[in-house]
Image (cartoon, grey):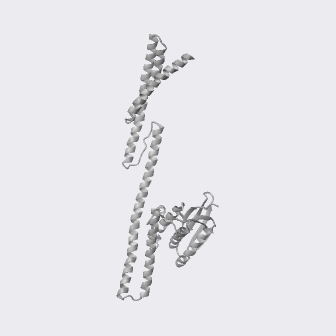
C-alpha cells in the first residue's frame, strides 16, 4: 500500500509540474491564435503523461535496460499521441477559420451560411446561433424597409389630402371676401365641414405620433365588453344609416376587461367606420365579443361585407399610411385609422389581426381578460 502511495505521489508530482508549466505558457499565449493554443494543450497533455510515467520509472530504480525500454516506449507513445492531437487540432482550427470567413461575410451585409461539417458541437451550436441571428437581422431590415416605404407613402398621401381641401378652402374664402359667392351659407357650411375633416386628420396624426413615441398614457378601468360594444355601435349608427349599412351586435358576451375606455372606444369606432365605408349599401357590419377559454383572453370582432382583401395586402393592412386599392379607399382617408387601432391595442398588451371570410373580412382585437 505504501509503495502504491509513493508511485501515485511521484506520478502526480511529475504530471503537476508539466501541467503548471503548460498553464503558464498558455497564459502568456492567451492572445495568440487558436492553433497555437491547441498545440500547447496537446504538448502539455502528452508531457504531463510522460513526466508522470518517467518519474515513477526513475524512482523505482530499474535497471538501465528496463529504464531504457520504458523511456523508449513512453517516447514513442508521446510522439504518436502528439501527432494525433495536432492532427485533430488542425480540424478544429479549420472549422474555426471557416466559421470566421462566414461571419466576415455576414458582417459585410450578406446572409450568414453556417459551414457544413463543424468539427465540434460548440462550433456547430455557434453556427446555428449566428444563422438564427442573421435571419432575425434580415427580417428586421425588411421591416425597416417596409416602415420607411409606409412613411414615404404616408407623407405623400397626407400632402395630397391636405393640399386638396386647403385649395378649396382658399377658393371659397376668396369668393366670400370678393362678394361673388352666390350662396354664402352653403360656403360657410362647406368650410366648416372641411375644417372638421382637417382637424380629424391632425388629431389622427397626433395620436399616431404619441403611440409611436411610446407616450400614450392609458387609464385602465374595469368595464364590460358588452357596454363598450354598445357605446361603439350607438356612436356609429348615424354613419351606418348614411351609407345604408345595417349595424348589428352578434353574440356579444358581457366579459369584463381592464382597458382605457376612451382609447378602446376609438379602436372600435375606427374599425366600425372602416367597415361601414367598405361595405356596400344594404350590407351588414357585425360586431361580436367572446371569451377565448383556451388563452384566457377576450376577442372583439368586426366583420364587414367588403368582398375580401387581396392576400398580398393582408400583411400591410395595419401599416401606417396603407390604403389598399382605390376601390377600397374611402374619401378623405389618410390610412391612419388601422395603424392607430394596432398601436392602442398593443399598448393594452393585446393584438390586432385581419383575415378574409366569405363575402368580406373580419378584424379581430384580442385583449387580456380582467381577473375575476
Identify the residue at horizontal 48%, vertical 61% (top origin). 315
Instruction: Judge whether 41 appears above or below 165 on screen.
Output: above
Along the line of sight, which residue is nearer the eye, 48 or 6? 6
Spot occupied by residue 174 in the image (x, y as percentages of width and height): 35, 84
Location of the C terminus by quadrant is: bottom right
Query: Total marks drawn?
Result: 0
Instruction: Judge whether 240 appears above or below 28 on screen.
Output: below
Q: Is residue 142 left or right of residue 218?
A: left
Spot occupied by residue 167 in the image (x, y as percentages of width and height): 37, 78
Q: Is residue 232 left or right of residue 98?
A: right
Along the line of sight, which residue is nearer the eye, 307 or 158? 158
Identify the residue at horizontal 45%, vertical 76% (top origin). 197
Along the line of sight, which residue is nearer the eye, 224 or 172? 224
Is residue 291 something one can see in this rendering?
A: yes
Instruction: Judge whether 159 appears above or below 39 on screen.
Output: below
Location of the N terminus by quadrant is: top right
Spot occupied by residue 12 in the image (x, y as percentages of width and height): 49, 23
Q: Quadrant of residue 102?
A: top left
Spot occupied by residue 138 in the image (x, y as percentages of width and height): 42, 52
Is residue 335 something one can see in this rendering?
A: no
Amino acid at each position: 500500500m505504501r509503495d502504491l502511495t509513493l508511485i501515485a505521489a511521484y506520478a502526480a508530482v511529475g504530471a503537476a509540474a508539466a501541467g503548471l508549466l503548460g498553464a503558464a505558457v498558455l497564459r502568456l499565449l492567451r492572445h495568440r491564435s487558436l492553433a497555437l493554443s491547441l498545440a500547447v494543450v496537446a504538448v502539455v497533455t502528452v508531457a504531463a503523461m510522460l513526466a508522470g510515467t518517467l518519474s515513477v520509472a526513475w524512482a523505482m530504480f530499474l535497471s538501465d535496460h528496463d529504464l531504457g525500454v520504458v523511456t523508449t516506449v513512453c517516447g514513442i507513445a508521446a510522439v504518436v499521441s502528439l501527432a494525433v492531437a495536432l492532427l485533430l487540432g488542425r480540424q478544429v482550427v479549420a472549422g474555426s477559420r471557416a466559421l470566421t470567413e462566414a461571419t466576415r461575410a455576414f458582417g459585410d451585409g450578406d446572409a450568414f451560411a453556417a459551414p457544413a461539417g463543424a468539427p465540434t458541437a460548440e462550433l456547430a451550436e455557434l453556427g446555428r446561433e449566428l444563422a438564427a441571428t442573421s435571419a432575425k437581422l434580415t427580417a428586421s431590415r425588411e421591416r425597416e424597409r417596409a416602415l420607411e416605404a409606409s412613411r414615404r407613402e404616408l407623407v405623400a398621401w397626407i400632402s395630397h389630402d391636405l393640399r386638396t381641401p386647403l385649395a378649396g378652402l382658399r377658393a371659397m374664402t376668396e369668393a366670400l371676401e370678393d362678394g361673388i359667392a352666390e350662396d354664402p351659407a352653403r360656403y360657410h357650411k362647406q368650410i366648416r365641414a372641411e375644417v372638421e375633416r382637417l382637424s380629424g386628420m391632425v388629431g389622427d396624426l397626433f395620436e399616431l405620433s404619441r403611440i409611436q413615441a411610446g407616450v400614450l398614457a392609458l387609464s385602465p378601468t374595469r368595464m364590460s365588453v358588452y357596454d363598450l360594444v354598445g357605446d361603439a355601435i350607438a356612436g356609429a349608427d348615424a354613419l351606418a344609416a348614411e351609407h345604408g349599412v345595417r349595424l348589428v351586435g352578434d353574440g356579444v358576451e358581457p366579459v369584463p376587461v381592464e382597458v382605457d375606455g376612451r382609447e378602446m372606444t376609438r379602436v372600435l369606432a375606427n374599425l366600425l367606420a372602416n367597415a361601414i365605408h367598405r361595405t356596400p349599401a344594404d350590407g351588414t357590419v357585425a360586431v361580436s365579443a367572446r371569451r377565448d377559454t383556451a388563452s384566457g383572453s377576450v376577442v372583439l370582432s368586426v366583420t364587414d361585407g367588403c368582398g375580401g382583401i387581396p392576400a398580398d395586402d393582408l400583411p400591410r393592412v395595419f401599416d401606417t399610411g396603407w390604403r389598399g386599392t382605390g376601390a377600397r379607399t374611402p374619401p378623405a382617408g389618410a390610412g391612419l385609422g388601422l395603424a392607430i387601432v394596432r398601436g392602442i391595442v398593443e399598448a393594452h398588451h393585446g393584438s390586432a389581426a385581419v383575415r378574409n371570410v366569405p363575402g368580406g373580412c373580419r378584424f379581430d382585437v384580442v385583449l387580456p381578460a380582467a381577473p375575476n
